[in-house]
Amino acid sequence: MYCAYQRDCYLWEYLVVKLRKFLFGMAAGLPFLVHGAVPAGAATFGDGGASLQGVLDGITVGSPSSVDVITDQVSDVDDSTWSVTASGGAVSTLIVEMAGLATTNVFGVYDAADPTKQVMVFDGAAAAGAQGVLSIQTDGSVFVNSVDTGVDFAANLFGFFLDSRPSREANTGIWFSDTSLNSDGFDHMAAYQGTGDLVDLPLVAAGVWTPSEYILAWEDLSANINDGDFEDFVVMVESVQPVPLPGAVWLFGSALVAIVGFARRRRQVA
């Protein structure tokens, strides 16, 4: 494919990947339209979800969590790509990190149009209760804790990643919310939307887990060795929303039209 600019190719490639995932989800996911069924492409638990369920129950005030970690996952078709909502800033709060690689794991976001563009939110020094604030400006510049990272995204459209490679241990890797980017083909992230439970996170006052807040639970080792308990890194992110295919196509389609239009005008001027 000819692209006037490399970004054009990234956008087209992104749309093709999203379309493939969407069509797969439509084909395989009709059963999950029934309430209580397991979502299409759901994360696979090695322990039946017991460990992560214990984490959610443990932060819920007064009773067990109303969230079932098996059936209440955001589908893998929908949890790949995200955007910051109208507030303009997304707060991430680290709930728990039980991995042996806790001191080296890196958590952050990547540009959905170019996954090589990555921004760290937490490094290995972060402990339970740590918070980071992400914002994406109108020009695409990415800020963390009000500091310009120097990285620009194509749009307010991104994914999350967990990078276990700094440990230099075997069977580590960088794992993306978009499963198609993972070298082992394994879904390393399970996502859950707030349902109104009262939760008590580390170091902050108890509050309602609202629908604009999501818990992301990660596996940090490759598929051939991980235990599938999804409690290696658990974080709550707020003021974000997943962007399924139609929204992503609209956002990137608009951006692509603008980019291509600019390129054509530039060639005409030249």
Image: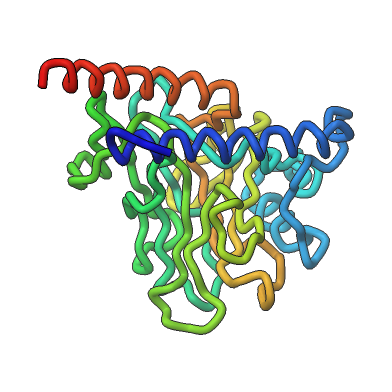
Rendered residue at 67%/43% (across/down): 76
Nearest the camera: 207 or 108? 108
In the depicted structure, whether residue 107 falls above or below residue 40:
below
Nearest the camera: 46 or 224? 224
In the depicted structure, whether residue 110 falls above or below residue 221:
above
Give the quadrant of the C terminus.
top left
In the depicted structure, whether residue 209 falls above or below residue 68:
above
259 vs 90, left or right, is left
Residue 190 on image: x %, y %: 65, 50
Rendered residue at 44%/64% (across/down): 163
Nearest the camera: 254 or 198? 254
Residue 237 on image: x %, y %: 48, 41
Rendered residue at 32%/22% (across/down): 260
Residue 71 on image: x %, y %: 81, 42
Q: Residue 142, located in which quarter of the rendered image?
A: top left
Residue 100 on image: x %, y %: 53, 78
Question: Can residue 64 be seen?
Answer: no
